[in-house]
Amino acid sequence: CAAHSGIPLTHRGVTRAVHLFTAQADAPGGPRYRAPAPLDDPETTLVAYMGAGRLPSLRDSLLGAGRSPATPVALIENGGRPEQRVIVTDIDTVVAAASDHQLQSPALTIVGEVATKALDNHWYGSPPIDARRLSGR
């Protein structure tokens, strides 16, 4: 999904690690992410599978761990399929952007500076939506 969206999960001088995880949880109310997930490390790209319905909890966990609200986020719907959509936003506005653009499952969430690369490296499917403009970024 990341490659089809033009997003390198690591990038020299930007990120040095990738953490892949599922955003689903057994507990009611959604996941609360704790170690070993490096939620507070701006040099780690986070990739959340199955998280379209858990974005409020993910956002709250990221902000609670100290991630900047301006950290870029890419939401990839139907990744690798002809109907793929990519929405680029930030942690602060991710829930609103998903709602405004009616994000549906299956979706992958990529958190980190590399998420904005989708805007420059687009090559597959419809052009990415830059939802950061909605918040004036």
Image (spheres, grey):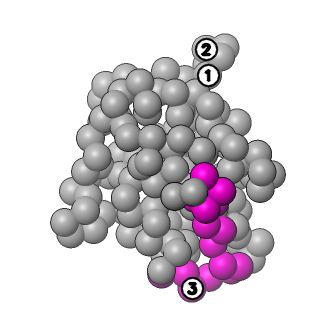
Membership of 93 in magenta stretch: no
**Image quadrant of residue 96?**
top right
- Residue 123: mark in rendering: 3
The secondary element bearing badge 2 is classed as: loop
Q: Quarter-wise, where is residue 10 in the image?
A: bottom left
Q: Is residue 137 above or below residue 67?
A: below
**Marks 1 & 2, CB-CB < 8 Å contact:** yes
The residue singled out by tag 1 in the image is: 30
Kindly identify which residue carries mark 2: 27
**Which quadrant would residue 113 be assigned to in this image?**
bottom left
Residue type of the residue flagged with mark 1 = Gly
Q: Residue at x 77, y 56 (%)?
A: 101
Q: Earlier in the sequence, mark 3 or mark 1?
A: 1
Let me know if residue 38 appears in the view: yes
The quarter of the image holding the N terminus is bottom right
Distance, label 3 to label 2, CA atoms, is 38 Å
- Residue 128: say if magenta: yes
99 relative to 84, above or below = above
- Numbered range of the magenta stretch: 121-135
Numbered tag placed on residue 59 in the rendering: none
